[in-house]
Image (cartoon, grey):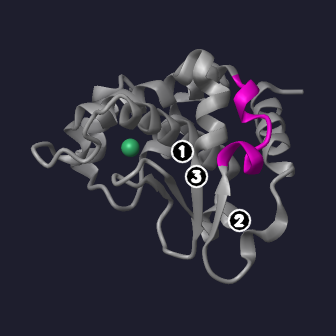
């Protein structure tokens, strides 16, 4: 199996066991470890939380919401908010990388770091750069091409200028 196909296969397998209630009306609150099964066994996740991986994921609340967008960590108590629409219709590789990125923010939150420090622009905020660097490292480990990683970094809500700046900060070339 070609490397990229294999990556897709492995990622799809991770999402196959998601409970199907994602499209139910209203928001639902779930526990990360119960919803995203087997994530605690992933090297990428253990690389974030170390021996606390199981403990953190079994306590991490996830709100599945109809609110638009993708996903983010709520700065009040560090829970995760994920758009149901994104979860059911988004590209699974992007969702996987976003989950890794957000889990990195959960770790930062648990360390007492300010996730939304207004002194910095989004693409210059140290917590973002750190989370993106970790995510890019995981994307490369999975065998994604630099081109595909650029595509991942490019979201419609950041400008071309900011996107280039971000790509440079996380050492992704060819963007
Ligand atoms: Zn972030």
- Quadrant of residue 115 in the image? top left
Looking at marks 3 and 1 on the same chain, the residue that comes earlier in the sequence is marked by 3
Q: How far apart are marks 1 and 2 (CA)?
A: 14 Å
| Placement of the C terminus among the 4 image quadrants | top left
Residue 129 x %, y %: 31, 31
Q: Which of 130 and 172 is in front in this view?
A: 130
Q: Mark 3 points at which residue?
A: 61
Q: Name the residue under label 2.
A: 88
CA neighbours of label 2 inside 10 A, class few (<14), some (14 to 19), many (20+):
few
Residue 108 x %, y %: 37, 32
For image coordinates 83% across by 66% down, the residue present is 20
Q: Are marks 1 and 2 in contact (CB under 8 Å)?
A: no
Residue 76 x %, y %: 34, 54
For image coordinates 50% across by 45% down, the residue present is 151
Q: Name the residue under label 1.
A: 98
The range drawn in magenta is 32-42
For image coordinates 58% across by 16% down, the residue present is 50
Q: Does the magenta stretch include residue 40?
A: yes
């Amino acid at each position: 199996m070609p490397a990229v196909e294999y990556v897709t296969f492995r990622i799809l397998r991770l999402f196959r066991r998601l409970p199907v209630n994602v499209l139910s009306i209203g928001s639902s609150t779930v526990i990360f470890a119960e919803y995203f099964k087997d994530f605690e066994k992933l090297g990428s996740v253990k690389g974030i939380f170390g021996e606390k991986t199981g403990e953190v994921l079994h306590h991490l609340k996830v709100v599945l919401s109809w609110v638009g967008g993708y996903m983010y960590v709520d700065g009040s108590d560090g829970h995760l908010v994920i758009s149901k629409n994104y979860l059911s219709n988004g590209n699974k590789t992007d969702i996987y990388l976003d989950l890794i990125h957000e889990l990195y923010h959960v770790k930062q939150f648990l360390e007492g770091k300010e996730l939304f420090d207004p002194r910095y622009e989004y693409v210059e905020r140290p917590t973002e750069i750190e989370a993106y660097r970790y995510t890019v490292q995981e994307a490369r480990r999975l065998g994604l091409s630099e081109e595909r990683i650029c595509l991942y970094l490019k979201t419609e809500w950041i400008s071309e200028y900011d996107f280039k700046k971000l790509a440079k900060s996380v050492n992704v070339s060819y963007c």
